[in-house]
Image: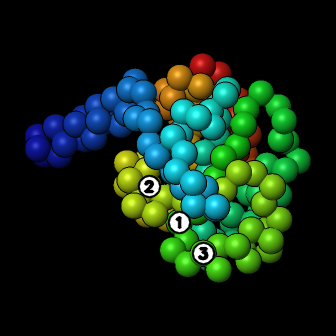
């Protein structure tokens, strides 16, 4: 029992440490193949969305984000897809109008331990992580976007 309690507190502590540290300046790849540092595309509070072509909740998420865009946050997306042709057709199918990047070496998705889609990460322009949310519900999206720095 004591080991379980200690393990529980270690898990809580490690999760809280993630939110007190700044996100490293990862390098992403644009659809055109250009390498871009994360800090280059972050101008204000930003919602980073990990998504995939096979993710049906992602389509609903993008519809909701389109309705509330241009508030006090930006949206950038990172596709978990490995096949570019599938990715490009999904961008059209999901009607994605936000910047889409690739994480071909999976450094960013591994950093956040992304194992499903969607995963939402809210952070400041200084790259301080404010909230990580797995999955999508409209209420969950509203809650994450209410968080201030």
Residue positioned 29% across, 35% down in the render: 14
Q: Local crowd at mark 3 within 10 Å, few (<14), some, or many (≥20)?
A: few
Q: How many marks?
A: 3
In the displayed orientation, state which residue is furthest to the top: 149
User: Marks 1 and 2, how far apart in space?
Assistant: 8 Å
Crowdedness near tag 1: few (<14), some (14–19) or many (≥20) residues, C-alpha within 10 Å:
many
**Marks 1 & 2, CB-CB < 8 Å contact:** yes
Instruction: For label 2, count other residues whose C-alpha is less than 10 Å away and answer few (under 14), some (14-19) or many (20+).
Output: some
Q: Please, what secondary structure does the residue beneath circle 1 have?
A: loop
Q: Which mark is residue 8?
A: none
Cα distance between the residues tagged 1 and 3: 10 Å
Which residue was labeled with disc 1? 80
Circles 1 and 3: CB atoms closer than 8 Å:
no
Given this view, does label 2 or label 3 mark the residue nearer the observer? 3
**Which residue corresponds to the image point at 65% horizontal and 22% vertical from the top-left?**
148
At a point 69% along the width and 66% down the height, the residue shown is 57
Camera-side residue of 110 and 19: 110
């Amino acid at each position: 029992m004591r080991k379980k309690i200690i393990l529980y507190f270690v898990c809580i502590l490690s999760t809280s440490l993630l939110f007190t540290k700044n996100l490293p300046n990862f390098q992403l790849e644009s659809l055109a193949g250009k390498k871009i540092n994360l800090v280059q595309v972050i101008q204000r509070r930003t919602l980073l969305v990990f998504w995939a072509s096979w993710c049906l909740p992602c389509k609903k998420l993008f519809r909701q984000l389109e309705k509330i865009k241009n508030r006090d946050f930006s949206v950038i997306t990172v596709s978990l897809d490995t096949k570019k042709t599938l990715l490009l057709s999904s961008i059209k199918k999901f009607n994605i109008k936000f910047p889409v990047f690739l994480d071909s070496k999976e450094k960013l998705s591994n950093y956040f331990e992304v194992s499903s889609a969607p995963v939402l990460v809210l952070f400041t322009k200084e790259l301080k992580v404010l909230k990580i949310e797995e999955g999508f519900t409209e209420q969950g999206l509203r809650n994450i976007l209410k968080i201030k720095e």
